[in-house]
Amino acid sequence: MATTKKTKKIVTPIDERETFVSLQKNFADTESNTEEKLKTLYDLQNADNAIEKLIQLRGELPSEVAELEKEVSACNGKIAELEQVIAQYNDNIASMNEDIVSLDGEMSKYQSQLENISNSREFDSINKELENLGILRKIDEKKIGESRDAIADAKAAIQRINDKLDVLGIDLEAKQEELAKIVESTAKEEKVLVKKREELAAKLDERTLSAYDRIRASVHNHLAVVTVFNGDSCGGCFNSVTPQRLIDIASGKKLVICEHCGRIIVATPDTPAE
């Protein structure tokens, strides 16, 4: 008895550059009901619209908070850099002080030798060494003075930044509290909407969901799914829709994409399918 071999359907990978013709074909090939998928897309768009409205209540606060946090972080980074500079100058001062102690020891040794010189040549030689050691000592002292001045400048800069941080901190705390209140007031509703969105998205195949997200990202008002406007136009770009496409939209049995803006056009739920 011959056995029939099952053929496995090959699913082509999603290409971000794919045309909407392939998406329409995907709609036709899938086992799920087209009308149901269109309704799911419509509901998904409504859920995303509702979530965006809640996010819009926050206004510019999220970006303002983020900008202030960035500025605070930059100030703290600058303070850390200045503190490293101060630490390096202090290390240099300690090293130069050690050099001065060493130079003083050598100079003391040569001063002792001056008491026991036997000729003028030796006297001149020792005095030359003392002169050179004295110059090195003055260089170290000058560098120590310059380092201390630099430390004072760095500390003054840190104080200015800290003063700025005090102002930024007050502003940031106020905006964070304001944002937190808004988020808290809408958190419950947003949680419900996000859960609903996830459930709706789970009903769609990967290709359809990818296309929906791509359309949303490409249009200014984030409307990927729209209804017919004024009886004969796309609800997204308001360009006219041909009579045949209007029939297809009303039937709910075919995916219709606006030839002008690329949005998916569906029948409104209260419009009976023909």
Image: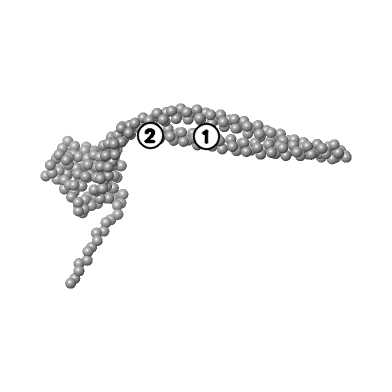
Residue 51 position in % (x across, y down) = 28, 37
Q: Is residue 206 left or right of residue 68?
A: left
Q: Is residue 257 left or right of residue 135?
A: left
Please say if the residues under marks 1 and 2 sit with CB atoms less than 8 Å apart: no
Measured along the vertical axis of the image, is residue 138 above or below residue 246?
A: above
Residue at 11% in and 44% down: 274
Q: Nearer the viewer, residue 162 or 187?
A: 187
Mark 1 neighbour density, 10 Å: few (under 14) some (14–19) many (20 or more): some
Label count reads 2
Residue 72 position in % (x across, y down) = 46, 33
Badge 1 element: helix
Which sits earlier in the primary sequence, circle 1 or circle 2? 2
Measured along the vertical axis of the image, is residue 151 above or below residue 1?
A: above
Q: CA distance from mark 1 to mark 2?
A: 24 Å
Question: Which of pointers 1 and 2 indicates the residue nearer the eye?
Answer: 1
Residue 159 position in % (x across, y down) = 53, 29
State the residue position of label 2: 63
Q: Nearer the viewer, residue 265 or 82?
A: 82
Disc 2 marks a residue whose amino acid type is Ser
Residue at 66% in and 34% down: 143
Identify the image quadrant of residue 264. Answer: top left
Q: Nearer the viewer, residue 161 or 27?
A: 161
On-image quarter of the N terminus: bottom left
Residue at 25% in and 45% down: 199
Identify the image quadrant of residue 41. Answer: top left
State the residue position of label 1: 79
Disc 1 marks a residue whose amino acid type is Ile
